[in-house]
Image (cartoon, rainbow, N blue to C red):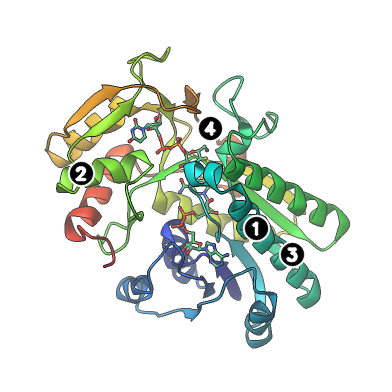
Amino acid sequence: MGKVLVTGGTGYIGSHTVIELLKAGYEPVIVDNLCNSKIEVLNRIKLISGIKPKFYQIDVQDKEAMRRVFEENEIESIIHFAGLKSVGESVQKPQLYYDNNVGSSKVLIELMEEYGVHNIVFSSSATVYGNPKSVPIVETDPVGEAASPYGETKIIIEKMLMEYASTHKDANVALLRYFNPIGAHPSGVMGEYPTGIPNNLMPYITQVAVGTLKQLTVFGGDYPTRDGTCVRDYIHVVDLAVGHVYALHKLEEKPGLVIYNLGTGKGTTVLELVHAFEKANNMKINYVVGDRRPGDVTECYANCDKAYKEMGWKAELSIEEACRDSWNWQSKNPHGYE
Ligand code: NAD
Ligand code: UFG
């Protein structure tokens, strides 16, 4: 149980993972440049766990500054969340995404070599499967044509880490392909609050619920699914966070390279999620069904048997619990961490 460098540790998934790492007895050391998160997150972590983890406000691309983190801490493993994640923005500013996401990963790999750190968990995404030929998606399904520069960065970083694993006999790499994280910490003090108008469904729903936004547009009602809306695999962020602790335990067995889908194994349509939210929180969400959003795949959900078989991890929390926790967070923090 040693020090774990958590890049992007004040972000949505990172902050929830820090809580689970502390619970499991690890000592997280957070690096984040705060480009998409708030320093207040550290106080919230303390509120939940009683511990304020060590924090460095550093851009992971800044190798000199990152050296300091490795010099000052005996890092045993890394969980690499830091990255930009807006699909739309990546289409507008592809170079920014390659620089930030690929660039920071390159720096980390070089520092792993320099400081003899062998274990890394990487935040990959179901987006690497592109438009899946069949669902549920298994890890051996082909990595597809990326739908955006954002997706392309995930494919490239996965490849960099695979090459790193194949050329370093001591290296242990876990590529975790997340499906759709939703929900918040059940305490209601930590959750997701995207800057600007949310791209993702759940924060959009909660902002309609809290009155910040007027109406949700359901993107497309004419897909060949049970109710005409797209199917995704929504996983509670706490389940996802716990998955990272299991991945670290797995890496301690020195497996070399491992790849896991982290989802629930269950597909949910957009309208099913909206109705689950309404039911869980006893309210109505104002929505209209509009045009399709370009680039959306019809169905994307995971087969997560491999993560269970090899790590003993599976998602435990329901969509209803995620809807309740998302609303608990949003209603108590209508402006996020501001
Ligand atoms: P987030 O934006 O909340 O967290 C990412 C954090 O990284 C932010 O705090 C940001 O300030 C920081 N960051 C970005 N670039 C940095 C840099 N160069 N140096 C230091 N810090 C930097 O996003 P999240 O939802 O928590 O996602 C975490 C990771 O999981 C990302 O890599 C994302 O691509 C991946 N992922 C997210 C989803 C999702 O739907 N949320 C799905 C699949 C994969
Ligand atoms: N949706 C709406 N209205 C909205 C927002 C979303 O109907 O206002 C729908 C989308 O059309 C989609 C579903 O809700 O059918 C989920 O959309 P999200 O944007 O929340 O999630 P995606 O599955 O499109 O995207 C997620 C991650 C991306 C990642 C992608 C593929 O957010 O980072 O999965 O893995 F690239």
Asked whether residue 252 is in view, the answer is no
Residue 109 numbered mark, or none: 3
- Residue 175 coordinates in the image, percent (x, y): 65, 49
Q: Residues within 10 Å of mark 4 (few under 14, many from 20)?
A: many
Q: Residue 213 has which mark?
A: 2
Q: Mark 1–mark 3 contact, CB under 8 Å?
A: no
Task: Find the distance from the CA under tag 3 to the CA under tag 4.
Answer: 28 Å
Say what secondary structure mark 1 lies in.
helix
Quadrant the C terminus occupies: bottom left
Residue under the point 56% across and 67% down: 7
Which of the two discs, 3 and 4, labels the residue nearer the N terminus? 3
Which picture quadrant has residue 80?
Answer: bottom right
| Circle on res. 302 | 4
Q: Nearer the viewer's eye, disc 3 or disc 2?
A: 2
Residue 138 x/y as whole percent: 62, 31
Q: Mark 1: which amino acid?
A: Asp
Which residue is drawn at the image coordinates 75% and 66% (left, top)? 118
Between 280 and 156, the one nearer to me in the picture:
156
* Residue of label 1: 99
